Image: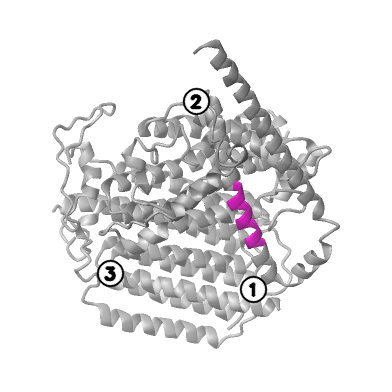
Amino acid sequence: MGQSLQSVALMGLGAVVLLSGVLVVQSRNLVHAGYWLLPCFLGVAGLYGLLDASFFFAVQIMLYAGAILVLILFALMLTRDVMNPHIPQNNRWTIPAAVLCLVVGILLVYSVGHSENPSPSAPFHYDITRQIGEALIGKYVLPFEAATLLLLAALVGAVVLARTDRNLPDTAQTAGIASDQGLGMPSPVVEKSSSDPNEIRQEHP
Amino acid sequence: MNGLDGYLTISALLFAVGLYGVLTRRNAIALLMGVELMINAANINFLAFWRCLYFNSSEPQIFVLIGITIAAAEAAIGLALILNVYRDFGNIEVSHINELNG
Amino acid sequence: MSVAHSGSADARRSGQFVGVIFVFIVLLVIAAVIGHLTLPGLAPVWHFLGAHPILNALVKAVVYVSFIALLVLFLIWWERKFAGWLQARLGPKHVGPQGMLQTLADALKLITKEDITPAVADRPLFYLAPFVVFVPTVLTFMVLPLGPHWIAQDLNVALLYVIAISSMTATGIMAAGWGSNNKYSLLGGVRAVAQLLSYEVPMVMAVLSVVTFVGGLSMRHIIDYQAQNGWLILKWPLIPAFLIFLIAALAELNRTPFDLPEAESELVSGFHTEYSGMRFAFFFLAEFANNFFSAGFAVALFFGGYLGPILPGIVWFILKTFVLITLMMWIRWTVPRLRIDQMMGLCWKLLVPLSLVVFILAAAWASR
């Protein structure tokens, strides 16, 4: 009973992951494409859970569905002008790329099917969180510290890179999100720009 | 369709889908979405091998953890760069961003 | 006011107080009876369910969702009652005994309201957003230890799971803000998401401070540790950890003083401006269910969960959670609202360094 339940779950989660993946790369509306990443990441998290990697199940949801997805959606919402849903979102390499990816996929699946493949062995008593913790502090402390340095550099770098230009009025950045010719909403007129963060600004719609 | 080959098939097809996204999309952010799909496919691969063959060792887990970390950092920096490009060029179609000092 | 009026007002207030205490005692007795029924009476039912995992999961899901629905009804009533007492007035008192059916009346009203969808709204996102906000909140109840045998699933990464699932609501709030196609909703949604993601950092560090003492991420493990070593709040470094967790939880729940994204006087009610009727009811339900969950989570982590001398475990858990929820409501109706830049400054400039210091202190204390 457990075995068949596991294979049903594997097939179901695989279908969810692949279907939402295809919709991510196919959707014409980019915000919809971003949102199709959510079931994809959740499906991948479910696959990690099936693989008894419970730590990665939680980390996948926390980082991918909770942080990276939000990052991508923020970036999509801040760069709205090009997202007119009437222009095609794919470039002229659609057919060759589809052929190439089909070939790559078939090659990989063929190589999977023609080798010795064991099943996930039955009982699994390892505490994965403890394993990772001991490895990170014991044998793999150098990659751990390097990743820390990388994250610090990424944090500082992203803050510096994404900073608003001095020339733009502070509210234009957020006003630009909501006013767009694609929606027909008028853009708010900002009368005066100043860099005093405590000043209350009035917007005239 | 059970066991290791099931996971590897899913990972392979997800990788191909992500590759299609990277190759065909015009918008730079949509390209990043394809890259994220590929990274996820590789992680599934790692963990499937770990669970079926190497569950005594922690190398695959460290690989996956550092991989997720790097993917997050890359997404953050990539999106910050894309926002800057958007501010300078006005659009973020990858075929139009082909001039330095533009 | 003449003396005669205030005298009868006092009599009404004390009469209300007695009435509400009576209602609480009745509900606690019911909870105690249910708590005692778990072990001996229904053993064959648990045996049957244990053999059929899918049926087991379905039954647990139905029980938990109905528990959450009833809980939210009760909590909304209590919020209005307590808010009334804090503001020197009586809360709802006409609809049902002590006004307890007021929430039911409100829910019926919300259900029968017209479902207005803006014409230019992004329909799939607009329709999906309430569910993406509500479902993770219900999922977190899966690991809440209501009583000694009342955890739906004893995950061994329960703490991490809770943090992960509750960070998914940010996606739903973005969908609500974007899908409404309304610049005020979008700004409210963006601010709400910024607040949610920022306040996760001190919350996670406060929870990790607890983990350094306990040595495991499972909820049952934490409560067993507290059974042997006393409540975790009694360890010195965990008192600031609990305070940081409380403040961060208030911000995660979008509760005053952190409710800028959804207050009615700011940004026209923020990301749920365009929602009416049942969809708004989902947001409301999600918020109150999350309230109970955060309070229950804090009780399980810091105050011993279901441990207590005489009464059954579930009664103690509900009592302690209730005290914490009342504290959160008290803060809500007393403190004014923070501005978004004050809120962000509080998080990144005060809470994050403080939580790091508390974490180091807790790790040092736990391993001495």
Chain letter, disc 3 residue: A
CA neighbours of label 2 inside 10 A, class few (<14), some (14 to 19), many (20+): few
Chain letter, disc 1 residue: B
Find numbered disc 3 in the image and state the secondary structure of the residue it sits on: loop
Measured as percent of width and height from the top left, residue C3 is found at 55, 11
Q: Name the residue carrying label 1.
A: B52
Q: Amino acid at mark 3?
A: Arg
Judged by depth in the image, the label closer to the viewer, 1 or 2, is: 2
Q: Amino acid at mark 2?
A: Thr
Can residue C58 be seen here? The reply is: yes
Residue C101 versus residue B43 in the image, above or below: above
Residue found at x 83% / y 37%: C309
Of C194 and B88, the residue lying toward us: C194
Asked if residue C84 is among those painted magenta in the image, a careful observer would answer no
Judged by depth in the image, the label closer to the viewer, 3 or 2, is: 2
Find numbered disc 1 in the image and state the secondary structure of the residue it sits on: helix
Measured as percent of width and height from the top left, residue C72 is found at 57, 47
Q: For the residues marked 3 and 2, what is the alpha-carbon distance in whole angstroms?
A: 48 Å
Find numbered disc 2 in the image and state the secondary structure of the residue it sits on: loop
Q: Which residues, given as a range, are shown in magenta?
A: C60-71
Q: For the residues marked 3 and 1, what is the alpha-carbon distance in whole angstroms?
A: 39 Å
Total marks in image? 3
Res C306 → quadrant: top right
Q: Name the residue carrying label 3.
A: A28
Residue C71 shown left or right of residue C200 in the figure: right
Q: Amino acid at mark 1?
A: Cys
Name the magenta segment's main secondary structure. Answer: helix
Residue A193 versus residue C164 in the image, above or below: above
Of A92 and C146, the residue lying toward us: C146
Q: Name the residue carrying label 2.
A: C334
Of A97 and A50, the residue lying toward us: A50
Residue found at x 19% / y 49%: A179
